[in-house]
Amino acid sequence: MKKLQAIKGMNDILPSETPYWQYLESVVTEVVQNYGYQEIRFPLLESTELFKRSIGEVTDIVEKEMYTFDDRNGESVTLRPEGTASCVRAAEQHQLLFNRATLVQKIWYAGPMFRYEKPQKGRLRQFHQVGVEAYGIETPDADAEILMLTARLWRALGMESAVTLQINSLGTSESRADYRAALVTYLEARRDQLDEDSVRRLESNPLRILDSKVETTQALLIGAPDLADFLDDESKEHFAQLQRYLTAADVPFVVNTRLVRGLDYYSRTVFEWVTDKLGAQGTVCAGGRYDSLVTQLGGKPTPAVGFAMGLERLVLLLQELNAFPEDISRTVDVYLVAVGDVMPQAFQLAEYLREHASYLRVQLNCGGGSFKSQMKKADRSGAEIALILGEDEANNGEITLKYLRSDEAQQTIKQQQITDIIF
Ligand code: ATP
Ligand code: MG
């Protein structure tokens, strides 16, 4: 029989790895809540139309990365490739954006996303994102604050020196149209040197060529017209104000006028946090302003700014940096060794500890075994302390306490005293 295996690019996150994820998720949760964000949870499956209309037909995601299929009723559905579209859909559907009574402007989400990509380190087919979206604020203070949030997160994780912030402004759709024309003229003259995808995009969506991963195309772009020279005055001022706020807040950044994003809905601010420690998959967090998406999906005009970060890449980076807390993979604090006919008393003792110190992770030896084999298991569990309950101890209401990670002498004490020592 053929061995059953997970689908390529869809990883199991094993018990030995989940502590890293839980730690990262808990720090992220704390920081976003620090800024007053509220969590939203939306379905993994949405109508295909939603992503086509938001992300854009001529993007990598919609053209070749979506898991799209017909359900049993013949409706085209898609496993979500990202969160912003669903977030806007849900916010609109439940009138979160314009109902004063339930006004929620700051929303975050976390969970798996699906893209049919070539799996490699830091690039999966099922991957995980945390996203943050702020609605209703047009001014660049919202952009600045969301970037301060990310900067705080990197500090909280101890990885601030490994990432750099790149920012750019895409201007309005009008100013982009002028730039688009100039870019097309430039690239038309070099059409024969462009890769196949880029040639196609020359007609459909030329700005996307700037985001091409093909090296020869990137080289060709070095002399291309600069988006910054085409910005309208208001976008210029918006961008300048953002930079002043970031400088005042001590968030270092680099302006990269070639930075565009892989999704069509952005306007004005776009940004990426990048690291040089993960090879080609160097972007750990990316986002920007998307002032026209809500109307594009049928809602009232609502400015918006947000980002998504890739948790796989962050876990890899934190491991690379040795930035996880040292004892992170320890899952047991106290191992209770029970030798002989003492299980009822052992249960009682273990429950007592769990009752009175809920932070303690207590593992009771089940399945019997000799003293020696149980002590071996205690050691392998990573526990700091072994509590030993043999028949003598049980009869005398005592317990033997042995420190597994230090030379401190073992001691036999009354069971009532245990809380004085362990808690
Ligand atoms: P890339 O250029 O690396 O393909 P993207 O521009 O497609 O990224 P976004 O859609 O902006 O990425 O998603 C935000 C973040 O989610 C990325 O910066 C990255 O950290 C993460 N991410 C995106 N696609 C994947 C994937 N297939 N596997 C793992 N993480 C991913
Ligand atoms: Mg991509």
Image (cartoon, rainbow, N blue to C red):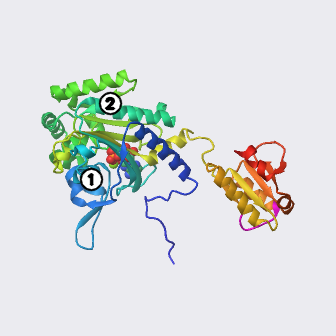
Of the two numbered discs 1 and 2 in the rendering, the one whose residue sits closer to the viewer:
1
Q: Is residue 350 above or below residue 314?
A: below
Magenta-tinted stretch: 365-371
Asked if ligand 1 lies within 8 A of label 1, the reply is no
Amino acid type at mark 1: Ala
User: Where residue 102 appears, x then y in whole percent?
Assistant: 27, 46
Q: Nearer the viewer, residue 215 or 97?
A: 97
Q: Is residue 406 visible?
A: yes
- Tell me the SS state at disc 2: helix
Mark number for residue 144? 2
Q: Within the magenta stretch, is there residue 264? A: no
Circle 1 is placed at which residue position?
A: 90
User: Where residue 133 appears, x then y in whole percent?
Assistant: 31, 42
How many numbered discs, if any?
Answer: 2
For the residue carrying disc 2, how many other residues have a C-alpha within 10 Å: few (<14), some (14-19), or many (20+)? many
Residue in the image at 46% along x and 35% along y: 154
Residue in the image at 16% along x and 25% along y: 233
